[in-house]
Amino acid sequence: MKNLNGKIALVTGASRGIGVHIINSLTEKGINVIGVARNKEGLENTKEIVKSNLGNFEYLQFDLSETSKLYNLTNQLMDKEIDYLINNAGIEIYRSFEDYKLDDIQKIVNVNLLGPMELTRLLIPKIKANKGNIVNIASLAGKKGVIYNGIYSSTKAGLILWSDALDQELKEFEVGVTAICPGYIADTGMFKDGGYAPPALLGESAPQLVGKAVIDAITKGKKEIIVNSGPIRPLLAIGQIFPRVSDVIIKWFGVPELCRKRAFESKGGNRT
Ligand SMILES: NC(=O)c1ccc[n+]([C@@H]2O[C@H](COP(=O)([O-])OP(=O)(O)OC[C@H]3O[C@@H](n4cnc5c(N)ncnc54)[C@H](OP(=O)(O)O)[C@@H]3O)[C@@H](O)[C@H]2O)c1
């Protein structure tokens, strides 16, 4: 088992939601965490939580949609060793495709895909030097297209394949790259905050399980981890062979109906 004590992780999406659970899992193992997000109050709240668990957490406020300025963030990390980069920040906007503005599309792609790529590119020399890990929080939405959330879905599919390619590329440097694919997450985060019940057959998972998956990614070098309460892998396999059949199964589970509600009901399902 790797000794994680005293290592340093940069975690994006540190101000609320799943990010807080990922940070708790890391700090419980003695890893010092630098969090990134925009909201200062949320970041301070995370700091209090970590402090009460006797962990070490500091943060940098940054808007990750400003991908061409990410060097301003990494310049502030020049004197730090970075062992692990956890690209967790993400946004989604449920909408009919024709109703998206170019600005919406760019923002989702920037935060969910281009941002992780550029942040990784800038930090790779440090991570290589430390034989560290890169962990990308993708989604089951990257495994099967999600209606009215297709931009999000495509960014998560992009994260999964980019992680696969980068893992192969960095193997000779002993750097592991993992894609974590959560399904619906309970208690906190963008799905919970939308206020909808998940389709019964797919269920929900505790956010702590995403934190555990991050530790497994780092310690066991896993390439891809699915966090979901139901048996999703056989369904994904069926979808690879018979894509139309998986449309029928997903419909039977009630996923398109839920997505339609999230796109068109006033409470919506958007998180920007
Ligand atoms: N919740 C689920 O059911 C679920 C399922 C599958 C995958 N995921 C993935 O898990 C990850 C975390 O999601 P979550 O549910 O915890 O979402 P969340 O509660 O909405 O939190 C998102 C985090 O990302 C940060 N963020 C968003 N836009 C940002 C920006 N422009 N610059 C900097 N930080 C930004 C937010 O911080 P600020 O607003 O303070 O900037 C916040 O800390 C995402 O990648 C999501 O796609 C979630």
Image (cartoon, grey):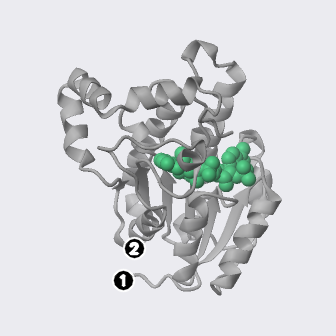
Residue annotated with mark 1 = 1
Mark closer to the chain start, 2 or 1? 1
Q: Secondary structure at mark 1?
A: loop
Q: Within 8 Å of ligand 1, the CB of disc 2? A: no
Classify mark 1: residues with Cα within 10 Å, few (<14), some (14-19) or many (20+): few
| Spatial separation of the CA atoms under disc 2 and disc 1 | 7 Å
Q: Position of residue 237 (x, y in %)?
A: 20, 38
**Image side of residue 169 versus residue 269, left or right:** left
**Image side of residue 25 versus residue 212, left or right:** right
Residue annotated with mark 2 = 219
**Image side of residue 71 versus residue 135, left or right:** right
Q: Closer to the camera, 19 or 131?
A: 19
Q: Closer to the camera, 54 or 201?
A: 201
**Mark 1 residue type:** Met
Callout 2–callout 1 Cβ contact below 8 Å: yes
Q: Position of residue 213 (x, y in %)?
A: 41, 64
**Mark 2 residue type:** Thr
For the N terminus, the quadrant is bottom left
Q: Position of residue 28 (x, y in %)?
A: 54, 81
The residue shown at (56%, 71%) is 83
Task: Give the answer, above or below, for where 40 lies relative to 6.
Answer: above
Q: Position of residue 208 (x, y in %)?
A: 47, 67
Residue 174 seen by the camera: no
The quadrant where residue 161 appears: top left
